[in-house]
Image: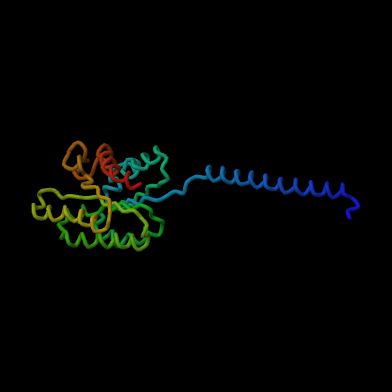
Amino acid sequence: MYKHPILYLLLFVWLGTGCSGNGSQDEVKSDQESETAKKAPPVMKNILFFGNSLTAGYGLNPSESFPALIQKKIDSLNLPYKAINAGLSGETSAGGKNRIDWLLRQPVDVFVLELGANDGLRGIPPTETKKNLQAIVDKVKAKYPEAKLVMAGMEVPPNMGGAYASEFRVIFRQLAEQNNMALVPFLLEGVGGVRSLNQADGVHPTAEGQKILASNVWEVLKGVL
């Protein structure tokens, strides 16, 4: 039936060898792709620090602000996050509500809200401040529903009046609870009222003061990251 059995045998062996060779090449290719994936740098995520002069690092070098110090901490731990300092001196909660839309043009994975201090110093009703802060949070949630949220709590000096100070202090915890936000109880803990840790105006932290602010925020933020 077969006139050239040897040729058929050789053809069979050649085909078998060819199929085996392709399988080996596929395995090598798969291993190479796996190694490439391992070496690929992680996708960077953005942490937006949205606040006033306390976030901006008023009177200091930008590298001394607490968001910049937190970036150094993040880098030392090789975490894939980029800190964006969106602090603006003099910013109120109302101003922040108007400014936030522009900043949300960039991706936001973690949002740290630090506003309200200037409202308190101006005696703005806490209910108004709370309403503005909620509006800011709502805008972030609408644009980036998966973003993790952090609230930086604030207090006002006793000379603003006991009733006002109590009403003001509580709005930050209320907002954090209502919006499932991690809470930094008081951003200026350990710094507020300490002359040596504040600049000549007695309001804005020195470089050493900013280090404490960074520690206060990191204590909460590290769990979020």
Looking at the image, residue 160 sits to the left or right of residue 148; the answer is left
210, above or below 87, in the image: above
Residue at x 31%, y 51% (from the top left corner):
112
| Nearest to the observer: residue 56 or residue 59 | 56
Q: Is residue 88 visible?
A: no
How far across and how far down the image is residue 200, in percent? 20, 41
| Nearest to the observer: residue 194 or residue 19 | 19
Looking at the image, residue 10 sits to the left or right of residue 149; the answer is right
How far across and how far down the image is residue 184, in percent? 24, 47
Residue at x 11%, y 52% (from the top left corner):
160
Q: Is residue 169 visible?
A: yes
Q: Residue furthest front?
A: 1
Looking at the image, residue 75 sits to the left or right of residue 39; the answer is left
- Residue 78 is drawn in which quadrant? top left
How far across and how far down the image is residue 74, in percent? 38, 41
Q: Residue furthest right?
A: 3
The N terminus sits in image quarter:
bottom right
**Which coloring applies here?**
rainbow
Q: Residue furthest left?
A: 162
Residue at x 20%, y 42% (from the top left corner):
189
